Amino acid sequence: MGKFMEQQEALKALREMKRVKKEMMAKYFCDLSKLTFTAMVLGGGISFFQETDPKWIIVIVLGLVIGIGLFGISINILKS
């Protein structure tokens, strides 16, 4: 019976390691989403107030799309 218990503990440790890895990967993509959103939206907002080219709209929209996409990836990682 000792061998069986060791295998069960090893299996439990492997499952825990996979769960932690999945959570860390999801947290990474969520943080990346927040950073991308903040950088691009604030950058576009600063361009708006400096009254430079009207490309600030593209930067803001691109920041929103990339941020939402990365957050979606993090949600999908947690669901799987």
Image: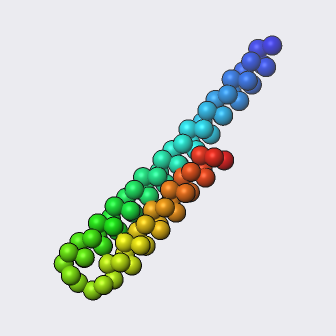
52 or 73, nearer to the observer: 52
Quarter of the image where one finds residue 41: bottom left
Determine the residue located farthest toward the left in the rendered image: 50
Instruction: Provide residue 60's location: percent of width, then percent of height.
Output: 37, 72
Which residue shows up at 66% across the image and 34% down it? 15
25 or 75, nearer to the observer: 75
Which residue shows up at 79% across the image and 19% down it? 4
Determine the residue located farthest toward the top in the rendered image: 1
Q: Is residue 23 above or below residue 2?
A: below
Instruction: Provide residue 64's location: percent of width, then percent of height.
Output: 43, 66
Which residue shows up at 61% across the image and 32% down it? 16
Give the position of the N terminus as an image quadrant. Answer: top right
Instruction: Provide residue 38's location: percent of width, then percent of height.
Output: 34, 61
Which residue shows up at 61% across the image and 52% down it? 76
Q: Is residue 53 above or below residue 12?
A: below
Instruction: Provide residue 14's location: percent of width, then percent of height.
Output: 66, 34
